[in-house]
Amino acid sequence: MLAAALGASLAGCSSTGGLRAEQERAAKAAGGKAAVNTPRWTFAMVTHSGDGDTFWDIVQNGAQQAAVKDNIKFVYGHDKEAQRQSQLVQSYIDQKVDGLIVSLAKPNAMKDVVAKAEKAGIPVITVNSGAEESKAFGALSHIGQDETVAGEAVGEELNKRGRKKALCILHEQGNVGHEQRCDGAKKTFKGDLQKLYVEGTNMPDVQSSIESKLQSDSALDAVVTLGAPFAATAVKAKEQAGSKAEIDTFDLNAQVATGLKDGTLGFAVDQQPYLQGYQAVDLLWLYKYNSDVLGGGKPVLTGPQVITKKDAAALEDYTKRGTR
């Protein structure tokens, strides 16, 4: 959107001429063609995602759409292990890419390599995780949600629903954003919130761990998962345990939208991953083209947005096409 607005303003002072130029740009982008004539820059995104994580598929969808519009060659790498993620970033620095987008789930492992990118003259935008560290590490901007604020929104929503005892499921140990989510929820929740650490790459283990906890503590009336794929697993655990706890989650996908509609899930906290990918590419393009920077040193927030049953129908089609 920002790039489109910039293009319209450059088309001239006439509102008709600007509209016509923008319509032409939109038509080109829709047809899979670049909407600008800037150089064919290469932007790399490197995240802490594991294999098969649907959340990051949505981030990539947004990034790829913006890349088409902005005449960008977009490449993607990921590794859930922090040191290997750092090595991937270094490989793109060595390839002399024109811009980098990185997540900082485990910021200490990424600090040095982000500094190397800056020293090499490669602009960096951080995305999703690491809002607190982004500016200090030398990134231009951070795009994502404030994880503590998102957690606080969960605690407030649990209060509205009359919940008294909740379980927060952390599926990736060492991820600072996950800790912030649970801590934020604990801060605003008037009841008792406990943490449960599970191995997120082993879904049977995740299910059995949640199931065991629900069986041993019948007072638990809410389970909060920190990623959409884990919500369905928590539902299975609840059913096997014979629990009446409400299952709530961070993030949105087609399965979560369906669960909200049919009442299997109570609510979801959406951070709009498509927007994170799209804006990251678009803002790098704007920086390369016009030295534009958004945020003024503060994160550019894409969430949180609490989604409930009444919202699910309107978002379901978007989740099916992979943009929400």
Image (cartoon, rainbow, N blue to C red):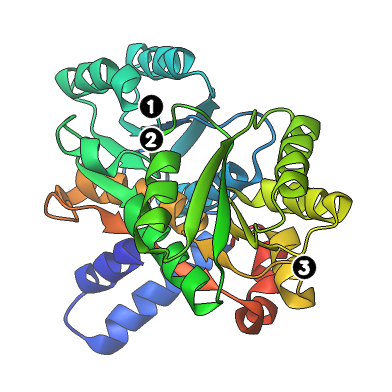
- Reading the chain from its start, which is encountered first: label 2 or label 3? 2
Identify the mark nearer the N-term, 1 or 2.
1
Residue 15 point in image, percent of width and height = 25, 87
Q: In this view, does 15 lie above or below 232?
A: below
Q: In whole angstroms, how far apart are the C-alphas of marks 1 and 3? A: 33 Å
Where on the picture, by quarter, is residue 213? top right
Position of 67 with respect to 212 (left or right) is left
N-terminal of the pair, mark 1 or mark 3, is 1
Separation (CA) of disc 2 from disc 3? 29 Å
For image coordinates 60% across by 76% down, the residue present is: 308
Residue 1: percent from left, percent from top? 36, 67
Q: Is mark 2 on a helix, strand or loop?
A: helix
175 to 243, vertically: above or below = above
Looking at the picture, which amino acid does disc 2 mark?
Val
Q: Residues within 10 Å of mark 2 (few under 14, many from 20)?
A: some
- The type of residue carrying mark 3 is Thr
Foreground disc of the pair 1, 2: 2
Given contact means CB atoms under 8 Å apart, are the residues at marks 1 and 2 in contact?
Answer: yes
